[in-house]
Image: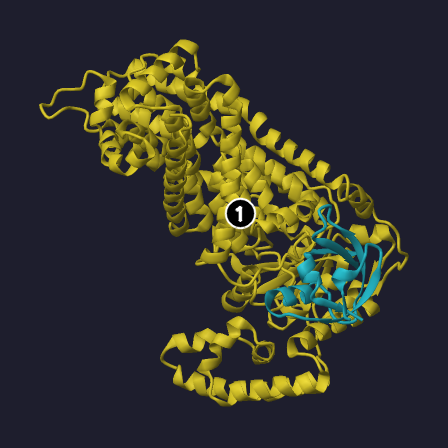
Amino acid sequence: MTRTLKDLSPGEHGRIKTITGDGPIRRRIMDMGLVPGTELVMERYAPLGDPVEVKNQGFHISLRKEEADTVILE
Amino acid sequence: MTEKKLVVALAGNPNSGKTTIYNNLTGSRQHVGNYSGVTVEKKEGRVKHAGYDITVIDLPGTYGLSAYSPDELVSRNVILHARPDILVNIVDASNLERNLYLTSQLLELKIPMLLVLNMADVVEQRGDKIDSDLLSKLLGMSVVKAVGSKNEGTQEILTEVIKIAENKIELPERQVRYRREVEDELLVLQRIINQEKTAALEIAAGSDSVGNSRLPYPSRWLALKFLEKDREIMKHLEEFDQELPLQIEKSRKRLQSMIGDDAETCLVEDRYGFIRGVCREACQTNTLERLTLTEKIDNILLNRVLGIPVFLGIMWLLFQLTFTLGAPPMEWIESGIAALAGWVEVNMAESLLRSLLVDGIIGGVGGVLVFLPNILLLFLGIALLEGTGYMARAAFVMDNIMHRAGLHGKSFVPMLIGFGCTVPAMMATRTLENPRDRLVTMLVTPLMSCGARLPVYTLLIAAFFTPRAGGNVLFSLYLIGIILAIAMARLFRTYLLPGETEPFVMELPIYRMPTLKNILIHMWERTWLYLRKAGTIILAMSILMWGLFTFPNVDEHGRAFNEPAIQLENSYAGRMGKAIEPVIKPLGFDWKTGVALVSGLGAKEVVVSTMGTLYSIGDSEALAAEEAAAVKSFAEKVREQSGFTPLVAYVLMIFTLIYVPCLATVAIMKRETNGWKWPLFMVAYTLILAWLVSFIVYRGGLWLGIGV
């Protein structure tokens, strides 16, 4: 089974393998520096469970779970 | 000596401190407009330096230059079409790698560039080092350090810009080198493009239009865009010969098979690869992982338990700041306007001109000015929330709920403000970057029951309901508003503005102290735009409303009406009330209610005083103050003359809740959407919705025998 960014619990690390989907969301995710090979940490879930916050080299990004689900991890 | 002119464009990521530097450079000599056809704001300022008259264009803050977001597209088109003399790229030096990603794409547009390392102090404090000379060599552009929040580096930026303009700096040209497979394909594509360009140039010698649409683009950039199937550039594909489309497909397929990833991913990866290389050479970073101040704050503010209470507390403060603190100055403005009107009344003989002056113009100006305290205070609050970095967190906390309703986490702020007043609420939608999110929020915000509707409810409740039932009635109205807003938002999102979902993906910037200058400029900019763009329309509409209620002022024999109620009945507004009677009859309303609803277009609270006049309640002030005797006589008269039952009164409240909040809202929406289409749509849909819901409630009530 493939593991996606959505599956990380707060505090867990992961390395990006690829990003599925297409169009503006995919491009935005990559433009924000989440490209294949990037290491990131799941920082936290929002109080209501969605969206989530991830950290990539001191830089904090929030994205919805449906978006996080397109980020496939190694 | 005539001054030499220069055009400089500022580009940078959101949160890179670009606006601060823009404000430092241009001070108060700024102008805000709109790019034609889109709701993206166009900001321009001017500064004089060393004999140059420099126009500074503040491009929207973006992370990239793709064609997916209107902001990014506008930035790119301004650079490509307006061709500024110099591009000043402002980067957050404390977050260099991500910021340089935009730089790598700007490089490809082939405009002389200056890199500004903003927040250089943060880098130093952290113990990191950036070798700006080396960075300059690696990127092929001049580099200046600055601290925007302390106004450091402003003069250096200007001096450097002029040096570049005068060609005093020679640096090697640099750009991203992509992996060999990509470069090979780029070369093939570029060759075809160049051939056709020359051919097209010959054809287009006479007509500008063909040539201008694509020829100013650098051919390597065009090749890149074709390779990544850029939406905007692909539109130009048909201008080219068959050879190019075929080659593009071939190249994309070849890359896919050789690298195993699509071209778009390759390009983004290679850009990041290039930047990483640059950073590794030019920067010395302290790799020590430690909890930054921002992370410590977020552990509290975004905490699973505390996150929502903190958010609600901050929103409560914002609401109080805007409306409670705004109330006294609003009263001063109102009493000032009333004093002026009173003075004119005393010093002028009664005439039509006096009526126009007092009720039309002075009343209209008052109607414009009265919103000022709210707008100033709201934008003080918003500037603080955005400047500190909390706004993004607010969206983070609320997005789950708002997204289910078809909205964005940031839609919460305008909708909350809507409970106070729809005019500043519409202006608050500016915090939403995405046009579709903004538009949907703007369309449903009027359904949040604003403060001006409250006097209508309380009067009708006092007249037709027991105090015990009153609370529930009032609560039900607010609830109906919220439910309708959610339902309509979903409806609009699905049917009116369908299409792919926009990314929510956003940065949670580090917490910062906003500068006073930024806050003041932001407040002033919003307020001035309101006065200039919406104020004039509101004033014109007020005068129009005055005319509708004043004319004709004499009967067919040329005699003035002696009763205000008769005059009102015979005015154009009175006739409009009568004309719409058949339409509102099924809701239990008669023409008098119709007139009251027409008057409510000017401002909702006027519904009460219009009814007072129509039913000849002598003391309209006592009625507005809900004095027991006045309310009782009002209830009796309305019951007698119009056959109102508690059910009809309730339906009237529902209608008042839903239909067009007021003309000022229409004016502000015209200004915010840059056209009449959406405000008119808002008017139409709220009227239809108000009728439908009222009809269902009225007929349902009759059928069930409630309140009859």
Amino acid type of the residue that numbered disc 1 sits on in the rendered structure: Gln
Q: Give the percent coordinates (x, y) of residue B572.
A: 22, 32
Q: Give the percent coordinates (x, y) of residue B235.
A: 48, 75
Left or right of residue B75, residue B345 in this image: left
**Can residue B31 be seen?**
no
**Mark 1 Cα-neighbour bin, 10 Å: few <14, some 14–19, many ≥20:** some
Q: Give the percent coordinates (x, y) of residue B179.
A: 72, 82
B256 or B560, nearer to the observer: B256
Q: Residue at x 76, y 73 (%)?
A: B273
Q: Secondary structure at mark 1?
A: strand
Chain on which label 1 sits: B
Which residue lies most toward the left here? B557
Which quarter shows the N terminus of chain A?
Answer: bottom right
Which residue lies most toward the right here? B288
Residue B233, above or below B556: below
Chain seen in cyan:
A
Left or right of residue A33, residue B52 in this image: left
Q: Residue at x 60, y 65 (%)?
A: A24
Q: Residue at x 65, y 53 (%)?
A: B18
Which residue lies most toward the top here? B629
**Can residue B58 be seen?**
yes
Chain seen in yellow:
B
Question: Which residue lies under the disc numbered 1?
Answer: B30
B563 or B491, nearer to the observer: B491
Left or right of residue B682, residue B82 in this image: right
Which quarter shows the C terminus of chain A?
Answer: bottom right
Residue B222, above or below B327: below
